[in-house]
Amino acid sequence: MSQMPRIALRVSGSVPVTECTEQARAAERAGFTTLWLAENPFGRGALPALTACALVTERIRLGVGVFNPFNRHPTLMAMEMATLDELCDGRAVLGIGSGIKVAQMGLPGHRRIAATRDAIHIVRPLLRGELVTYDGTMFSTRNVRLEFPLRRSAMAVFMAAMGDQALRLCGEIADGLMISNLAPRAFTRRAVEIVARSATAAGRASPGETVQYVPCAIDEDGADARQRAKAMVGGMLASFWQSSGTSAATLSALRDYNGVDPEKFDHTMRRLVAGEPAPSVIDDALLSQYAIAGTASECLEQCRAYGAAGVTELGIWFAASRVLVEIERFGRLLASAPR
């Protein structure tokens, strides 16, 4: 039997802070291990929501997934995360990534791998309380240290990565890997292997955690759950396919690892982009590449499949109208699932 990954809740910047706190409480009651707050340009900022969630929870980890060094300098990341960690009594975890394009902000966004490398090399020692001097390609510091007592001696720093170069860097310097939505398990398996090989080449242990975001729908009626999941996945696929902001690595992940004939997949995407309803375009086999959906037993089996691919924590998210109901349902599944 494959290892069951831990279950986290992923919340986007589209969710109002008051609703986010409700979801955080529900996720903690349900036994979820982490609340991951996504932060994208022009959506709600992650920190106010995480601050509010810190005040209404006691055990669940509170994660930023992710901060971008182009619009938040690494020293500011360290300041804010250390302060959050103080507030939540050592439950904060940081993800860093530079895949989101920031041209609309007037920021350059070039040399993303170098920017992420610099950010991690600056943030991690600052969060250990060290005096940091670092000469980087994109970011540098001179004799800086956080000027307040830290809640603990270190904080885990994850790296979001999709392309091979980013995955290799993750293996070299990060504490964990973060994989975003729409990545089939075949991609995940390969990504985890690249990270592990890179870590070995760097003479260090492989990052201990792999977190993957996956849309989810769970219901006593598995067919109804799959219909909801198809609507979620279809919207994302069409958006990613059309967006000039989608990286080549992300497009490759969703297109090249789903086991579908390329011509058939291109036809499916043309239908989705043209506005055909996703439930009539996406079949169950394609859905299974991008989502966890079905009855409790079906969802359990699918979670274990992600575990077999190397995922240690699934950051699941649900349709907006059913979040609290489905968190509770998934909690019952976790309580009954053999480990």
Image: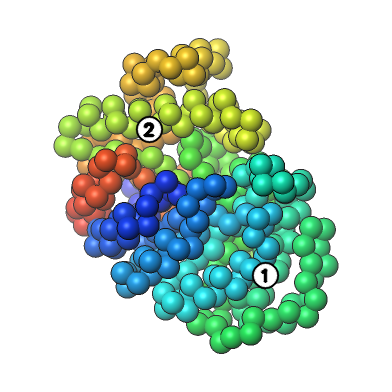
Q: Is residue 117 above or below residue 217?
A: below
Displayed quadrant of residue 17: bottom left
Rendered image: mark on residue 91: none
- Residue 138, percent across and down? 79, 58
In the shown orientation, is residue 190 left or right of residue 117? left
Displayed quadrant of residue 227: top left
- Work out whether mark 1 precedes mark 2 in sequence or the reverse, and give the earlier one: 1
Q: Quick one: SS at disc 2?
A: helix
Rendered image: mark on residue 232: 2
Nearest the viewer among 316 and 193 is 316
In the shown orientation, is residue 112 left or right of residue 155? right
Amino acid under disc 1? Thr
Determine crowd level at label 2: few under 14, some 14-19, many 20+ residues with C-alpha closer than 10 A.
many
Amino acid under disc 2? Met
Q: Residue furthest left?
A: 220
Q: How many numbered dots are placed on residues in this image?
A: 2
Q: Is residue 122 above or below residue 221?
A: below
Q: Which residue is mark 1?
A: 75
Whether residue 177 is visible here, answered yes or no, is no
